[in-house]
Image (cartoon, rainbow, N blue to C red):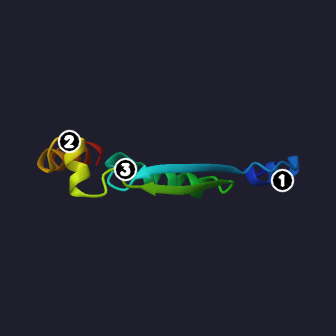
């Protein structure tokens, strides 16, 4: 039986795929998706994932501006974590 890698090699094709994964470091949905990205790389060696992390709300003031208060922001973010994980 011919393996997938042997077939690719026979075709002489460079099938490299690069995925840039942009995510907020506090984002529960991105955190929940990370194991899928790692599994993708393990199962498909031609895939390369480049992680691009950032912070949408880097301080208490930013959280307060986004959610009208720090407490509302905390409640919203924790709610996302409960839903995603």
Residue 68 marker: none
- For label 2, count other residues whose C-alpha is less than 10 Å away and answer few (under 14), some (14-19) or many (20+): some
Residue found 52% across the figure and 50% down from its top: 21
- For label 1, count other residues whose C-alpha is less than 10 Å away and answer few (under 14), some (14-19) or many (20+): few
Residue 65 left/right relative to 29: left
Q: Is residue 10 visible?
A: yes
Residue found 50% across the figure and 55% down from its top: 52
Front of the two marks 1 and 2: 2
Q: Report which quarter residue 66 is drawn in.
A: top left
Q: Which residue is mark 2?
A: 67
Q: Report which quarter residue 42 is drawn in.
A: bottom right
Residue at mark 3 to residue at mark 2: CA–CA distance = 22 Å
Residue found 52% across the figure and 57% down from its top: 51
- For label 3, count other residues whose C-alpha is less than 10 Å away and answer few (under 14), some (14-19) or many (20+): few
Query: Which circle's residue, 1 or 3, is located before the other in the chain?
Result: 1
Residue 9 marker: 1
Residue 32 marker: 3
Q: Nearer the viewer, residue 55 or 45?
A: 55
Q: Nearer the viewer, residue 37 or 42?
A: 37
Q: Position of residue 28 (x, y in %)?
A: 32, 49
Residue found 26% across the figure and 50% down from its top: 62
Residue at mark 1 to residue at mark 3: CA–CA distance = 34 Å
Q: Tag 2, which secondary structure?
A: helix
Q: Nearer the viewer, residue 9 or 33?
A: 33
Q: Tag 1, which secondary structure?
A: helix
Q: Position of residue 48 (x, y in %)?
A: 63, 56
């Amino acid at each position: 039986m011919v393996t997938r890698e042997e077939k690719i090699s026979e075709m002489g094709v460079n099938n490299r795929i690069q995925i840039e994964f942009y995510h907020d470091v506090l984002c529960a949905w991105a955190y929940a998706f990370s194991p899928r990205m790692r599994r993708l790389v393990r199962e498909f060696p031609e895939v390369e994932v480049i992680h691009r992390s950032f912070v949408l709300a880097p301080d208490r003031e930013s959280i307060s501006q986004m959610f009208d208060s720090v407490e509302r922001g905390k409640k919203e973010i924790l709610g996302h974590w409960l839903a995603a994980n």
